[in-house]
Image (spheres, helix red, strand yellow):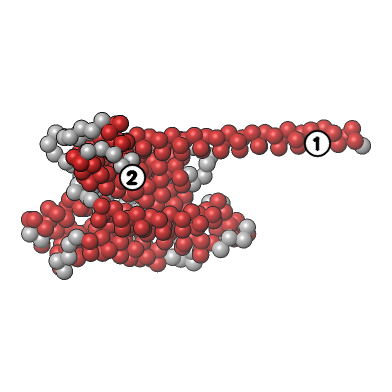
Amino acid sequence: MRDTLRPADDALRAATARVSSVRRRGRARFIGVSGGLLVAALVALCVALGYGDYTVRLPDVVATLLGGGDSGTRFVVLELRLPRALLALLVGCCFGLSGAVFQTLLRNPLASPDVIGVSSGAGAAVVLAGGLAGLSGTPLSFVALAGALAAGTAVYVLAWRKGVSGYRLVLVGLGIGTGLSSVISYQMTRSDVSEAQTAFLWLTGSLNGRSWPHFWPLLVGAVLLVPLTALAARALPALQLGDDTAGGLGARVERDRLALLACATALAGVATAAAGPVGFVAFVSPPIARRLLPGQGAALLPSAATGALLVIVADFAAQHLVPGTQLPVGIVTSVIGAPYLLWLLARANRSGQGG
C-alpha cells in the first residue's frame, strides 16, 4: 500500500515545489520591476531638479535636499523646481492607480477616467464655474473634484442594470463624456479670449506655474485615498473572476465594486484638480505595468509607479523640448497615448472585437 501511494506523494510534492518556485519568481519579478520603476522615477526627479536655465549639479541637488546649499540654489531647487516635480510624480501616481483599478475591475482596456467621462466632468465644471461664476485659483480645484465625482456618479447610475458591466459602463461614459465636451466647447465660444486661453491651457493638462500651494491639497487627498484604494482592492482578485464566481466566494460584489469605482474616481478627481485632465496617463500606465509583469493581475503599485515616471518625464520634455517655450504636459502625454489608442482599436478590429 505504501509503495502504491509513494508515486502519488512524490508527484504532489513535485507539483507543490513547482508552484512555490513560480510564486517566488513572480514575487521576485514584482519587487524588481516595482523597485526599478521607483528608482527610475527618483533619477528623473533628480534630473528635473538639476537641469534648466540655471543648472545645478547632482551633488548640489542632493546637498540642498538634505538642508545644505547656498541661498540661490535652495531657492531654485526647493521653491521653483521641487514642488512642480513632486506634483508631477503624485499626479502620475494617482492617474496610474486610478486607471489600473478601472481597467482591472471592468475588464476593459478602454476603461480609464479620461475615456469614460470623469475628466470631462471636471473640465466642464471648471469651465462653467470660471465663465459663469468668475471663480479662479484654489476654488476651481474643488470645483474640478466635484465635477469629476458628479460625472462618475452619473455614469454609474446610468449604467446600472441590476449590476454594472464593463462595456455598458464604458459606452455610457463615452456618451456622457461627449456631451460634457460639447458643454465645454459651447462655454468656451462664449468666453472672451483671455478666459478661453486660460481654460484651454487647463483642459490640456499643465504643470506650468505650479508651486507648493498646489501640491499640499493633492498630497492630503493621496494620503487619504491610496490606503482606501489598497483596502478596497483586496476584493479585486475575486471580482476579476466574474460576478457569479465572486459572489460564490463570499464577496459583496456591488458594494466592493462601488467602493473601488469611488476610490478610482476620487483619485482621478484630485489629480485633475491639481494639474488639469492630463490625457492618457491613466490609459497607458496600467498596460505598460502589466506587460512588465505578465500574470500579476491588477499590478496596482507598478501602475502607479509607471504613471509617476511617465508624467515627470513628459513634464521634463514639455519644459525643454522647445527652447524658450514651456508646453503643457498634456500635449506630450497625448503624443504618447494617442498612437496607443489607435493601435488598441486596430488590434481589437483584427481580433473581431472592435464591433
State the residue at coordinates (46%, 63%): 258
Query: Image height check: is 122 above or below 89?
Result: below
Kindly identify which residue carries mark 1. 9
Q: Secondary structure at mark 2?
A: helix
Numbered badge on residue 103: none
Where residue 353 appears, x then y in whole percent?
Answer: 42, 44
Q: Are marks 1 and 2 in contact (CB under 8 Å)?
A: no
State the residue at coordinates (26%, 64%): 143
Numbered badge on residue 89: 2
Q: In this view of the protein, which residue sits in the foreground, 51 or 119?
A: 51
Quadrant location of the N terminus in the rendered image = top right
Amino acid marked by disc 2? Leu
Give the residue furthest to the left.
193
Left or right: where 43 falls relative to 320? right
Left or right: where 131 falls relative to 329? left
State the residue at coordinates (56%, 38%): 27
Give the residue furthest to the bottom.
133
Query: Image height check: is 307 above or below 163?
Result: above
Cα separation between marks 1 and 2: 51 Å
State the residue at coordinates (20%, 53%): 202
